[in-house]
Amino acid sequence: MYKNVFFKNRDIIIILMIIAAAVILYFGTRPFIKEGNSAQILLDGRVIKTLDLKKDTTFSPEGMDVVFEVSNGRARFVSSDCPDKICVNTGFINKKGQSAVCLPNKLVLKITGSDVDTVL
Amino acid sequence: MNKTKYITYMAMLLTLTIVLSIFESMLPSFTAIPGVKLGLANIVVMFTMFFIGRKQAFVLNIAKGVFVLVTRGAVAGILSLCGGMFSMLVIILLHTVFKDKISYLLLSISGAISHNIGQIAAVSVMLNAYAFMYLPVLIISGVVMGSITGVLLKTLLPVLSYPIKEAKR
């Protein structure tokens, strides 16, 4: 059986340090993330379609009630038949490495850069 | 505590874990970010780990994962298991290192953060997506949700541990 106390004053400092670390991580990595130039659509981990972010298009995977859109260099889930709509609520994404995930449909929308950028 | 009482007590804790897990999945998600959840079921798992035993908490975690697997599909089940197991591992590790110098609140927070990390690791591997972009957001969410579940654990402690006190009398 554990015999710890519930709270120590020192905890506040540790919590603030954790929050500071998260904030630094968020703003510290942002400048290094460049805008991508294509959007990959993955079904169950495999790429089923690559969309060019420079061309405005819409795309719907065969046999699925899901619609993707590329507009002004950004991509998003327009609609999905999943119950939670987390993928649609993620909204537009355009930074390299960003992704919108629809777990019920096993679909991932992922922004990728050119090969040169990927090495960096 | 005699054997019958022990079995009943464990069954009650298991039921509580599953019911809280269902209850939470019924609540509307209040953010657009996946993974930002309260983790109510973790209250019971943490209680079990702190006051009954690690083995029993391990069983609860597995049972919860299997239940999610059966009712909400393989992906959700694996996510639940990865999060739960990693969270337990981190809490045990911290407790082994710091013994009783670390507070329950911090254990609860680190449990919530590692639960999130376990889940994004699983998402990254399964769907081949870089979900680690969410890490800062999920750390903050872990701090908030971990504090809430920690406070709830403290509040519910007299009720949850009643059978233990009863048996000692």
Image: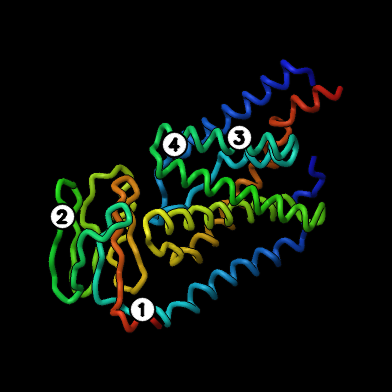
B42 sits to left or right of B5? left
Label 1 CA crowd tier, 10 Å (few <14, some 14–19, many 20+): few
Dividing the image into 4 quarters, which one contains the N terminus of chain A? top right
Residue A88 in the image, given as x and y percentages of width and height: 28, 55
How far apart marks 1 and 4 lie (CA) works out to 36 Å
Which residue is labeled 2 in the image?
A60
- Give the spatial CA distance, label 3 vs label 1: 42 Å
Task: Write down the chain letter for disc 3.
Answer: B
Type of amino acid under label 1:
Thr
Closer to the camera in the image, A99 or A47: A47
Q: CA distance from mark 4 to mark 2?
A: 28 Å
Residue indicated by mark 4 = B69
Task: Give the number of the mark in front: 2 or 1.
Answer: 1
Location of residue A57 by image quarter:
bottom left
Q: Is residue B48 above or below residue B119?
A: above
Q: Residue at x 20, y 73 (%)?
A: A53
Q: Mark 1 and mark 3 in contact (Cβ < 8 Å)?
A: no
Crowd around label 3: few <14 · some 14–19 · many ≥20 (10 Å): many
Seen at 25% across and 68% down, the residue is A39
Of marks 3 and 1, the one in the foreground: 1
Q: Are marks 4 and 3 in contact (CB under 8 Å)?
A: no
Is residue A17 found left or right of B27 in the rendered image?
right
Mark 1 lies on a secondary structure that is helix
Q: Which labelled disc corresponds to residue A118?
A: 1
Going by the numbered disc 4, the residue's amino acid type is Leu
- Asked if residue A42 is positioned above or below residue A104 in the image, the reply reads below
The residue indicated by pointer 3 is B60
Chain letter, disc 2 residue: A
Mark 4 residue crowding within 10 angstroms, few (<14) / some (14–19) / many (20+) = some
